[in-house]
Image (tube, coloured by chain):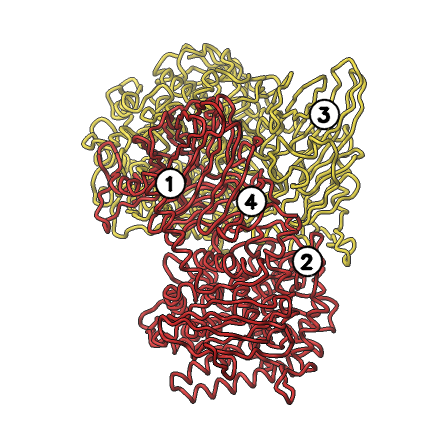
Chain colours: A red, B yellow
Amino acid sequence: MRFGHFDDEAREYVIETPLTPYPWINYLGSEDFFSLISHTAGGYTFYKDAKMRRLTRYRYNDIPTDSGGRYFFINDGGDVWTPSWLPMKKDLDFFETRHGMGYTRITGERGGLRVSTLYFVPLGETSEVQKVTITNTSDHVKTFSLFSYLEFCLWNAQDDQTNYQRNLSLAEVEVEGSTIYHKTEYRERRDHYAVYSVNAEIAGFDTDRETFVGLYETLAEAKVPNAGTAQNSMASGWYPIGSHQVDSTLQPGETRELVFVVGYVENTEENGQGKWADDAKQVINKTRAHELLARLDTTEKADAAFEALGEYWTTLLSAYTVTSPDDKLNRMVNIWNQYQCMVTFNMSRSASYFETGIGRGMGFRDSTQDLLGFVHLIPDRARERILDIAATQLPDGSAYHQYQPLTKRGNNELGSGFNDDPAWLIIGVDAYLKETGDFSILDEVVPFDNNDALAQTLYTHLTRSFEFTLNNLGPHGLPLIGRADWNDCLNLNCFSTTPGESFQTTENQAGGVAESTFIAAQFVLAAGQYATIAERGGDTQQADRARKAAATMSQVLLSDGWDGEWFLRAYDFYGNKVGTHEDTEGQIWIEPQGFAVLAGVGVEHNADGTPSATSPAFRALDSVDRLLGSAHGLVLQYPAYKSYRIELGEVSTYPPGYKENGGIFCHNNPWVIIGETVLGRGAKAFDHYRKITPAYREEISEVHRLEPYVYAQMIAGKEASRHGEAKNSWLTGTAAWNFVTVSQYLLGVRTDYDGLVVDPQLGPDVAEFTVTRRARGATYVITVANSGREGSRASLEVDGVAIQGRTVPYAPDGAVVQVRATL
Amino acid sequence: MRFGHFDDEAREYVIETPLTPYPWINYLGSEDFFSLISHTAGGYTFYKDAKMRRLTRYRYNDIPTDSGGRYFFINDGGDVWTPSWLPMKKDLDFFETRHGMGYTRITGERGGLRVSTLYFVPLGETSEVQKVTITNTSDHVKTFSLFSYLEFCLWNAQDDQTNYQRNLSLAEVEVEGSTIYHKTEYRERRDHYAVYSVNAEIAGFDTDRETFVGLYETLAEAKVPNAGTAQNSMASGWYPIGSHQVDSTLQPGETRELVFVVGYVENTEENGQGKWADDAKQVINKTRAHELLARLDTTEKADAAFEALGEYWTTLLSAYTVTSPDDKLNRMVNIWNQYQCMVTFNMSRSASYFETGIGRGMGFRDSTQDLLGFVHLIPDRARERILDIAATQLPDGSAYHQYQPLTKRGNNELGSGFNDDPAWLIIGVDAYLKETGDFSILDEVVPFDNNDALAQTLYTHLTRSFEFTLNNLGPHGLPLIGRADWNDCLNLNCFSTTPGESFQTTENQAGGVAESTFIAAQFVLAAGQYATIAERGGDTQQADRARKAAATMSQVLLSDGWDGEWFLRAYDFYGNKVGTHEDTEGQIWIEPQGFAVLAGVGVEHNADGTPSATSPAFRALDSVDRLLGSAHGLVLQYPAYKSYRIELGEVSTYPPGYKENGGIFCHNNPWVIIGETVLGRGAKAFDHYRKITPAYREEISEVHRLEPYVYAQMIAGKEASRHGEAKNSWLTGTAAWNFVTVSQYLLGVRTDYDGLVVDPQLGPDVAEFTVTRRARGATYVITVANSGREGSRASLEVDGVAIQGRTVPYAPDGAVVQVRATL
């Protein structure tokens, strides 16, 4: 069952009913100012930091679930309604929400009034525009009032919802003309305030929530819009809000446009602004607010800003496009998967409808993986991100697991010890170098532990990453797992007995010999990448060393890391196997199977160069299919743990079938998919891909529940009572890994050091397609005739000339290269 | 305007309309299990710790304000309504909420059904009883369904509202008969679960919120009760709830009683219970739940438990009672003020409708002050509390400002440095000794800093408290203020420029000489008390030393601490005066005026022994009257600070008229009132008392807004736009200080070492009254004929015999002593 449709031309998902199975959201903003917005106008706004500079208030998991947003009420001669359906939920003659690239347009119509609101954050601005277009669709004159509404947050989103003894005495506002200034705490240590304005004369305003809504009223029953008259209330403590009343009379067919702006303003020494316009009366300096509002005070200015935003996205998304008969594939590749990658770049894991924006810094592992998905879109910012991340690395090559985006310093509370972290830095830099060819980044001098005195070249950072794993091997020669590896919830040294204690921060037991086959597989990949980087930098000795280390690790994986039909997952604190047929639960885990094969471990070849179908890699992925497969994707492990295994940690705290305990983690399904392409089994790879990819799940939205245009972290597994139900959409490494998978391995077009690799592997269902790839200044138009034949590689013609191998050499700046690939 | 009335005989406040100006709440429980409940059944329950063991979910400051509770829905042939008015808000033919001592009864009637629910926590139980009585008041047979509803919290109240990425995958329940078991996280590290049951056959149940309420529905629109059929939903992740459907048919006039119980159960090694009934199927061991429920599974058992609760309160409250022509006075003294003192004993500052229960430990200062209000009610637990608190004192006499009630250890995050803390220990012990005569407490060996190796006698603790102030004097000989004194918001060494930074935890500037006249006045009182304790323990040398130190401090206060017409408040970091007529703002502060006079500073006497009306004490309190007085009580300082004074800290962060910046702090008004009784100005004292005391403010409830039966911390001051509006009710030292004031100084009956002091000072408005006081095993019936004559002390007859002085000697155990006092 669908609740909307894709409008690919407009790059929009069009929601046709307010009654989606969960609030379906979008993100506005791509620089310093961000908004979350649901299809019924729920959500909130913030400046840079979702915890410390929250502008508007939202309540997570309230009743109803999506409560709080920026709403408009219409009082049309006593008929009071909200075009976003919520909060009033009056029947609408028409409802539609269009989530687009950095904007959302919500349209509601009732009783001959159509109200369409376009929400977006203009480029270069610290504000959200709400452009309201009202059309009289009736055959008679309409006179009505519109009331805007948002609730201000007292800046620190966590304090705002806990420290009432203080906070309820703080609120202060000013009102000047049509502009509401929210200045709580500005009187003391803040140098910032919020504004909410409209480019029209107002009939009144309200800034006190109780006056506007009431004490016992819901938002649907809000007093002021229902009564029809603003009270001009001035907040003094309690709950400050912003609401304008705008009265209109429209002839039949007439349209009125209003531009509302909610914005963030700083008066700092740096920008040369004084704090007060009138110190004695504590009247704030509004100069910068006036300037901010003046830039968006006409329909024309708002429209121009919106147009610029569209051009920004058109440019961004043109780096990689596909044209194929499969619309779902096209829209994921060309629009939504890349869009989601940009959102994860902006947000890391901080603010979604499952993340409150108050708990998390940037992840070392998260951000390096996210980079794989956005490096082709914004290589300059990828470069900056790499250097930021590397600066939090510790001198021994290990890393703070998270760092704070505002300070760019490592998070001491969470600390280090996730032993997969170091290698991700190599994997991220490898992607950057292949995309850009910018080897100068390796010579950048970057601190360790944010300490300039410890600074070394980025290349040295990579060396330390490489050496870290070798310096931390266990008794089988496999890498020690430390606190956890990619699976944050596999905590083999933790042994936690305290309820509620975080498995990520509690003290680990010393002396353990717990080893991770996942890190081993990851090391095989990363050491190979590092070897190439070293070699190209002239450090052949280190290159040899790394190649040998990778080969050794690969052998260890196939001996001590092998269970007979698949790779083990780990050795625990006591040296016992995890992920073995000898156990009754958790017999097979997905992570090492996928990652080992994608790294080439156990891929043996026949005499003709094709992979041997009896080699360990095939057996591992066949086991994955048999044991982890389900209608909704591959579960993380099987059978799920029925009870708490203290020696395994958090993974066994989840009920069977959810999250890391047998849930379908959309983040590691791609490793298996890439593995299948390595084995030349494109059909199977594409099948796995389609099971978890949202556009292909659109038709079962009532089961999947979350947005059909972006990935969720997890889909409930086959042992869950709610199998197929997704959770935690938007902010997940899933976005990057799936884009890597589909663009580089299924469609098979990826940058390499010396050219563009073209190696499509997606089975026969897409008989022909064209990929357009912008890389290093040139554009490659790659037309693929795809038989889907297994085990083969495409033959290539470049500008009409057949070439050997899979790599199209890079062309000069500005060139357009025609490539024909035939499989 | 009133919204209810006092029913003094029943010891209840009766709320007659749901539309009170704010949710008016009550507390249930006095041992290990607690509930907050509003007049419309909002609130939540917890076991011991409001943060770590929250059983049910509540959302603070939601829209509407009071959202979440334990509700009953009635579906009476399609007419669906809630007897607690909220959440459905249907018109009721009758509504009444009776808040009593540890219980609340909410009655609603509609369409011929009267539903009355009695909520209470039985003594000795870890459960809340909800006894529902349904009467068919119509003249025809009624067939209807009742649906219970509460939402479970996932134990840690803070994590519950922040960590959705994990929490939304966790929920697990079991259902057995009529009992719902909430067992989220029991599978792993928890040894506890919650139950919700009813002593009747159920027609169905629900445990999944979305099934019961819906996704876009409000609680008023909840699907199941509106449709009339429970869905028997089993929660699996998302939001677990508990709901029963009970069907009934009642003849005209017939009544049905149902006993619902929500309870907390532990299976621990200590109580010898295994974790599972069936380990393989993860079926929990329910033995203790069955036992818990069996103790309350009939109306008779519930009624007996309720009766026992009433007797408990009757006994408690009989320690001090007054009979007078002033009903408001009687009900505050006999019922509500003492009740509030017990609640502050139980809760400290942790959980109210302004405190979320997740942020605070027990305060060193808070708890020692609270003790003044409950020591006569529960001396044994006061003894225990004193020893707990003393154990967190540091070896130099200073103290952790807060400690955690579960661990009883000092809170390192908040730390030490509030330089008034030490002396409160003396003041608390003084009150305990006077109440009980139990000098053995002084010999108890008590750790410093919770370190047994550092243990010393409690007397030594008092000595360290005394010495601490002497060891921390500033250049004028006044005590250094440290981080703050009683006024947490007067931060003279802080100089904070970072928005949102806590003034209580940020680093203080070193080298400051900021001094506090408040601590000086407090020292005069405490040193005098310490001297008496030392003397009675035979340590005459230390007694002399303390008396001299007190006298010296008193002199310093009158020289360097005196501004001309009142006491200064402080010297700041630079040695500048705070609280002086030389400033334009904050010229006079209330704290040192009241406390100095109550400690006897500046009280000079005439030849006849009466205080001299021209002495500094009179001038100070006259200045208080003139400058701090308002229709709603005495403001904290005047004029309030219009802008942030970085050298004063948090006090100037509040808008003028609110909180510590010119608000009416009901906590320090009593010091002035006691001071006035010291000066013999009873009429003025009683006038101040009545302005802030809730029962006297009942008639202006629409202005005061909060409960008319308990004190609030703060009433907005005369410079606030909402002058007279109260905030932060229930958990405030205001309760203890006002009870001390009215019982010991206005009515004038207080325990002393050698007998009961009788010294009424409340002016002429209460011409006669009788106080009955139980003390040290005897009962004193004190009848006062009160002219209200100023400056005089009463003459006393004890059992018909006139005595000299104000002290009635203690009588033997069991004696009943008749005292006549004539003023």
Could you say which disc has been placed on residue B78 in the image? 3
In which chain is the residue bearing label 1?
A
Query: Residue at image x 58%, y 58%?
Result: A328
| Residue B579 in the image: above or below residue B452 | above
Q: Mark 4 and mark 1: span between their CA atoms?
A: 25 Å
According to the picture, the residue beneath numbered tag 2 turns out to be: A657
Coordinates of residue A116 in the picture (x, y in percent): 46, 37
Give the SS element for disc 4.
strand
Q: Mark 3 and mark 4: span between their CA atoms?
A: 34 Å
Coordinates of residue B510 in the picture (x, y in percent): 27, 52
Kind of residue sitting beneath label 1? Val
Kind of residue sitting beneath label 4? Ile
Q: CB of mark 3 within 8 Å of CB of mark 4?
A: no
Q: CB of mark 1 within 8 Å of CB of mark 2?
A: no
Q: Is residue B363 left or right of residue A457?
A: right
Kind of residue sitting beneath label 3? Gly
Of the two numbered discs 4 and 1 on the same chain, state the one appearing first in sequence: 4
According to the picture, the residue beneath numbered tag 4 turns out to be: A15
Q: Is residue B491 left or right of residue A708?
A: left
- Residue toward you, A295 or B291: A295
Same-subunit check for callouts 1 and 3 = no
According to the picture, the residue beneath numbered tag 1 turns out to be: A262
In which chain is the residue bearing label 2?
A
Give the SS element for disc 1.
strand
Same-subunit check for callouts 3 and 4 = no
In which chain is the residue bearing label 4?
A
Q: Does any portion of residue A710 appear in the rendered image?
A: yes
